[in-house]
Structures are given as structure tokens and as C-alpha cells.
Amino acid sequence: MVRLPIETKDGEFVAYYSELGLAGLEFPKEKGESDRFSSDKSTPSAEVRRWHALTTKALKQVLAGHTPETLPPLDLSSGTEFQQRVWKVLCGIGSGKTMSYMEVAAAIGQSKATRAVGSACGANPIPVLIPCHRVLAANQGLGGFSGGLDWKRKLLAREGVEYIGSSTRQRTLGLAIV
């Protein structure tokens, strides 16, 4: 895999590319943290450089609270069939929208697989671009997030999403929670 940094106002993300496309994205690291993916030191091909330009643009759009115009090809081969089905549903959640773990489970035809959906979200190799931060708990609480709850709060706030625990009343998907 080819490892390439992405500088943002929020810190340095790291993107990983296989021969199939973007295979991983890591949040900026704290001191002492190691990379989640292994990488080689080869010079990236023209194709990988093109994918990296798309990844950089898409990441900056999401960090600004918008849905990306275009994504690079995504290599989701590290996931199981179940995880890949979950990740595809997540790709359909637009900026400023949310789904619950239960709604994602229902969307893949496995309404009782709520916990497995949570695990699939946690295993998401391309957080932010595959927007697992837009999945909330059934009570409209935050739930978990592989990048940490601070990142989840920050990303949702930038998209204008309110949730239980935010400073104002809850509104998601345009519906008020009573």
C-alpha cells in the first residue's frame, strides 16, 4: 500500500492506496500513535496521485460540512461481505443527515443486527469519507466512533446535526424528537 499525507486545518490525515483505490484513511495522530496500515516507500503512480487529489478534495469538503462531489475508487476488500454492505449504506447518508444503527441494519435487510452494524462502523477503514460519524444510537445519542467522540461531535456540528447531548434540542432527518 502507498501511504500519502493530507494536510488539513485539523491536522495531518494519512491516506492509504492499494492497486484498487483508497483503502484506508487515518485521523491525525497523537504523539506516539502508530499507523493502522502498513505501507511501502515506493513512488506513487500517476493513478494513485490522481486518486489522492480526489481524496484530498473530498476530505476537505467533508471537514467543511459538505457532501463530497466525487470520491476516488474505494477498496473495501478488507471488510467482510456484511461490513461492505453496511459501508455502502453509510455512503448514502448525505451531509447533515443521520441514521440510527437500527435503521442501517434494516437498510441491509438484517433488522436484528444492530450491534453488528456498530461493529462494522467501528471497522470502517475509510472514516469521514464513508461517513460512519452520521450513525447515531437509537436514542439519538452519539454512540461510538473509531476516531473518538470529539471527532464525531466536531464532524456532526460542522454539518449542522444536533443530537442528544448537544446544547440545543434534537433535530435529525428533519424530524423533531419529542
Image (tube, helix red, strand yellow):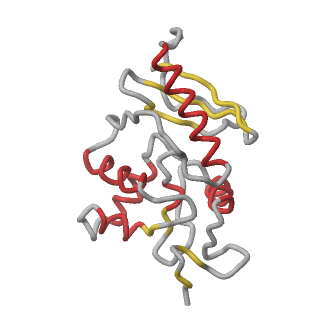
From the viewer's side, name the closer residue of 116 and 108. 108
Furthest-top residue in this view = 42
The x, y position of residue 147, in whole percent, is: 58, 48
The x, y position of residue 54, in whole percent, is: 54, 32
Reply above or below: 158 against 40.
below
Furthest-right residue in this view = 9
Left or right, 151 with reference to 45: right
Q: Quadrant of the N terminus?
A: top left
From the viewer's side, name the closer residue of 114 and 161. 161
Left or right, 106 with reference to 62: left
Furthest-front residue in this view = 69
Residue 77, located in which quarter of the rendered image?
Answer: top left
**Residue drawn where x is 37% and y is 70% of the image:** 102
Reply above or below: 170 against 142.
below
From the viewer's side, name the closer residue of 67 and 90. 67
**Residue drawn where x is 49% and y is 19% of the image:** 2
The x, y position of residue 52, in whole percent, is: 54, 27
Residue 32, located in which quarter of the rendered image?
Answer: top right
Q: How many marks?
A: 0
The x, y position of residue 109, in whole percent, is: 23, 65
From the viewer's side, name the closer residue of 125 and 7. 7
